[in-house]
Image (cartoon, coloured by chain):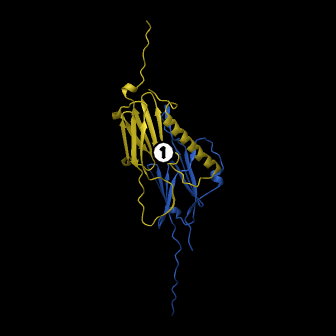
Amino acid sequence: MFLTRGSYPWGSLRGALSEMERLRREMDHVVGAYSARPEGYGDASVFPPVNLLEDSDHYLLNAELPGVGPEDLEISVKGKQVSLQGQRKSPQLPEGVRFHRRERSQAGFSRLIGLPAEVDADKVEARLENGVLRVVLPKAEVAKPRKIAVSAS
Amino acid sequence: MSVSTDLTRRDESPATAGAERTKTEPVYAPAVDIYETQDNLVLLADLPGVAKEDLTIRLEEEVLTIEGAAHASAATGQHLLTEYISGTFYRQFTVGEAIDREKIDAKLKNGVLELVLPKAEKAKPKRIQVTSD
């Protein structure tokens, strides 16, 4: 019923990729040499990057969504899947602007994140704070761990 | 004569490559858009997880520094998927001279910083009226 990192190939692969990307950025910073190509999301990783945690009663999903307001984001939960969809709004630009740098992505995004077990879709809570989405997904009753009393005969 | 208002990256600057941090958390260079309008130089930076109180913007001499710490989620539990690690955002730019420092405006919304650097009024050529008596 529970998936660990080892038994979740896509998850661990993404994790490894993002870890490599993180290390690359860290190295870039250490040597002070930024790569010539634009930094940002979308290279070697998907948007938005997601962290998924589990405690005994909940799954906690965090995603980095800078520039996405509540009105630009659609979250839906069905069975064991959470879907995040939305659009990063491009700023209203006045006439005749000249870009010096354009590293931020403005693309739409859509992600489907698989959960190890079913959640109670009615009790899901989502909050956007400083560009980070935090979703609390209570596990469905059937998915919660149950303590079995052992009786001695 | 043109007055350069270009933002250029400070490569091999001692400030970015020098002093080590005491914390070992990762340091990221935030993705930025920088554009120039007739009156302003505008910088947009992705700083997810950075609260207003944790963001520092400095313009010292001609060096613009953006630094902000993102708070990691306080949630505890078993990690099933880790695609990002919260850390500090840090980036420096060299700004041309022609910025009106008194009128710089910074806004933080949905994890995106919008920094408006108004261009300073250039000294306009002045025609001297010659009068005769």
Question: The disc labelled 1 sits on which kind of residue?
Answer: Val
The chain that appears yellow in the image is A
Q: Is residue B87 above or below residue B34?
A: above
Q: Nearer the viewer, residue A10 or A92?
A: A10
What residue sits right under mark 1 in the picture? Answer: A46
Residue sitting farthest toward the bottom: B133
Chain of the residue where label 1 is placed in the rendered structure: A
At 42% from the left and 17% from the top, the residue drawn is: A148
Residue at horizontal 38%, vertical 37%? A125
Q: Residue furthest front?
A: A9
Image spot of residue B52 (x, y percent): 48, 48
Residue B66 shown left or right of residue A150 in the figure:
right
Residue at (50% x, 33% y) in the render: B79
**In the rendered image, which quarter is residue B87 located in?**
top right
* Quadrant where the C terminus of chain A is found in the figure: top left
Q: Which chain is blue?
A: B
Q: Residue A22, located in which quarter of the rendered image?
A: top right
In which quadrant will I find the N terminus of chain A? top left
